Image (cartoon, rainbow, N blue to C red):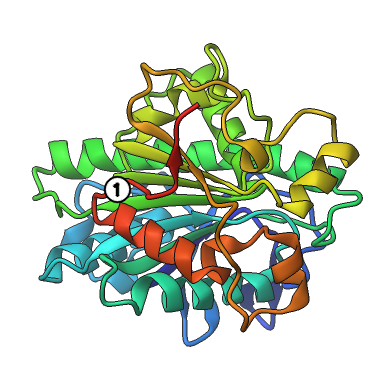
Amino acid sequence: MNLFITNREIIEENGIEGIREDGREHAGDNLRFGEFKNNKFILFEEPAYESETNYQDLLLKEKDELKGSVRFFRELYQELIDSGGNKNDVLFFIHGFNTDLNDVQSAFKNLKEKYVDDPASPVKHIVIFTWPGRSPKVPYHYFDDRKDAIRSGEALARGMEKVIRFFKDFLVKGDNVPCKRNIHLMVHSMGHRVVKHMMLEMKENRLPYPDLFKEIILMAADIEFDLFEPNEPFNKLIEFGKRIHIYFHENDKVLDISKYTKNFSNRLGRYGRKKIDQSQIDVCDADATGTKVDRSYGLEERTLNHWYYYTSTDVVKDVIAVFNGKKSKYVVQK
């Protein structure tokens, strides 16, 4: 199953809602939920009344009667609780800049091929948070994306608030059986700025950080490399999961450009953490510099070394091993 959450612009044509396709919009405050099926983004109808967001009794209605986040949680829960076997994990993916709707389709395709179709992977379902990333793939100027990432993080914080409420109403008050499946988080490039501002928004509103994920994978992070320092937002990121792997590549040319177009701070996805805090035993830096991009990919992917979470077979296999509970073979000590 493929699901999505978005704060992109919603347009209406002939009475049918859809997502603006070209990405040329600013990030919105409202979150919408839906399913990606048969290469189409199908939006769940937005609830008009508070009574339509009842998580506690969502199993008492047919799924087609449900709206918004209630339909989203029902679809995902039902899929997880009904499926047997070990291969039933969820991969929640947050993409980076320069991602229009066609690119999100490609992301679903790439993630499925690399992390679902591989029989060694425990992942079966993909969920993507898609936000308006508008700038060129090679970011000589992408200040709009930075602003949209901040606003998108604030919107995603409201999504986390819905998760907290779902756990409380559906599992505790509703006394429903937990699915006992694993959800993994993977973030790419400027998607880390979305996560940063999600955490800042949650802190400001005094929301608890839910222990939602098993493995957290940070890929090619386009964000400052001191973000795990004390009093910095990612210092508390481990509270969202069991373990964090930070994959970095010293020849990531996109992050070189980023450094000199936004500000002069070093990038987490280029060097790993500024300092290794030995007390953070569940946070690991994984040096992917020595890995190779598969020859089947184009010159851009092979030269820029920024999309190795799907272009490098070595990295993909390593991430799958992490999903299966192993530590990355690329972990370094500083």
Instruction: Provide the secondary structure element on which disc 1 rests.
Output: loop
Q: Which residue does the image show at 61% across and 32% down from the upper left?
A: 197
Residue of label 1: 54
Please say if 151 is above or below 217: above
Residue 107, image quadrant: bottom right
Residues 68 and 315: in front is 315
Q: How many marks?
A: 1
Residues 183 and 217: in front is 217
Q: Position of residue 312 (x, y in %)?
A: 54, 68
Q: Amino acid at mark 1?
A: Asn
Residue reaching furthest to the top: 231
Q: Position of residue 196 (x, y in %)?
A: 59, 32
Q: Which residue does the image show at 72% across and 49% down from the upper left?
A: 27
Residue reaching furthest to the bottom: 38
Residue 97, image quadrant: bottom right
**In-image side of 270 versus 317 (left or right):** right
Query: Quick check: can you spot residue 151?
Result: no
Residues 308 and 201: in front is 308
Please say if 320 is above or below 54: below
Q: Position of residue 70 (x, y in %)?
A: 34, 55
Please say if 206 is above or below 166: above
Q: Which residue does the image show at 78% across and 48% down from the upper left?
A: 145
Please say if 90 is above or below 296: above
Residue reaching furthest to the front: 290
Query: Quick check: can you spot residue 174?
Result: yes
Q: Which residue does the image show at 60% across and 56% down from the upper left?
A: 95
Q: Position of residue 117 (x, y in %)?
A: 35, 79
Residues 169 and 244: in front is 244
